[in-house]
Image (cartoon, rainbow, N blue to C red):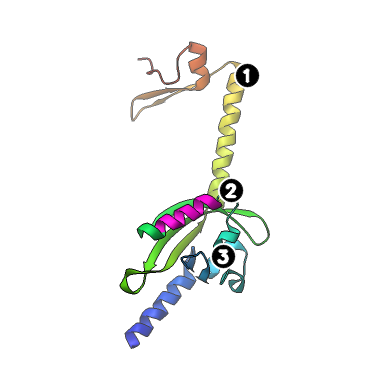
């Protein structure tokens, strides 16, 4: 009994103090338990998350894929990881990386799904900024009629930009000249 109590206390401390969002979710998507980090990521109080259907806060454009991923994870008992958007309590969208793992109870029957939820909003914003910058560079090269090339010294590989390929009349997938 003492060992079990110590194990439960250790689990609770780990769950509550984790630097990532954590939740225990029923097989139907209902939040059974959540930690403070998840509440901060989503902007909900603990009393607002527990009992809530997680599908209600998934971004509508991601819902079908998220349902399928969760269903596959439960059906196959395999851990799955996906990037998706949640709708915060204030209506803002937040990008997260969700890892789901089925926790089985007695006789191997599904008990609940353990979810680890990491806020990746900053990374997604940086990726978007890089994409916009790359598009702007390509457009500037196209308008100016200039291109560029790079030489990877380690791999001894030459790469040409789309515009330099066009200027030289080369197909983009053609081997680089020697």
Q: Is residue 26 visible?
A: yes
Q: Position of residue 131 (x, y in %)?
A: 56, 36
> Residue 129, relative to residue 117: is it above or below?
above
Q: Is residue 78 visible?
A: no
The range drawn in magenta is 63-73
Nearest to N terminus: mark 2 or mark 1: 2
Check disc 3 and report its element: helix, strand or loop: loop
Q: Is residue 152 left or right of residue 131?
A: left
- What residue does disc 3 label? 53
Check disc 1 and report its element: helix, strand or loop: helix
Q: Residues within 10 Å of mark 1 (few under 14, many from 20)?
A: few
- What residue does disc 2 label? 61
Q: Are marks 2 and 1 in contact (CB under 8 Å)?
A: no
Disc number at residue 143?
Answer: 1
Q: Position of residue 69 (x, y in %)?
A: 45, 53
> Residue 13, relative to residue 127: is it above or below?
below
Whether the magenta-drawn stretch holds residue 109 is answered as no
> Residue 69, relative to residue 37: is it above or below?
above
Task: Give the quarter of the image for residue 144.
Answer: top right
Q: Which quadrant: the C terminus?
A: top left
Give the residue at x 38% y 84%. 5
Q: Is residue 19 left or right of residue 7?
A: right
Q: Are marks 3 and 2 in contact (CB under 8 Å)?
A: no
Give the residue at x 56% y 65%. 53
Majority secondary structure of magenta residues = helix
């Amino acid at each position: 009994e003492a060992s079990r109590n110590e194990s439960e206390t250790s689990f609770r401390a780990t769950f509550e103090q984790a630097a990532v969002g954590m939740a225990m979710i029923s097989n139907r998507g209902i939040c059974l338990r959540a930690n403070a980090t998840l509440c901060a990521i989503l902007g909900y109080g603990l009393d607002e998350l527990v009992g809530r259907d997680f599908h209600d806060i998934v971004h509508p454009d991601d819902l079908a894929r998220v349902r399928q991923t969760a269903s596959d994870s439960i059906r196959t008992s395999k851990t799955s990881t996906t990037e998706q958007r949640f709708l915060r309590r204030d209506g803002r969208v937040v990008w997260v990386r969700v890892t789901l793992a089925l926790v089985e109870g007695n006789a191997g029957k599904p008990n609940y799904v353990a979810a680890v939820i990491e806020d990746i909003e900053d990374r997604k914003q940086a990726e978007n900024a890089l994409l916009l910058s790359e598009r702007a560079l390509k457009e500037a090269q196209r308008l100016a009629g200039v291109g560029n090339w790079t030489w990877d010294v380690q791999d001894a590989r030459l790469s040409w930009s789309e515009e330099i390929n066009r200027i030289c009349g080369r197909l983009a997938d053609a081997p680089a000249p020697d």
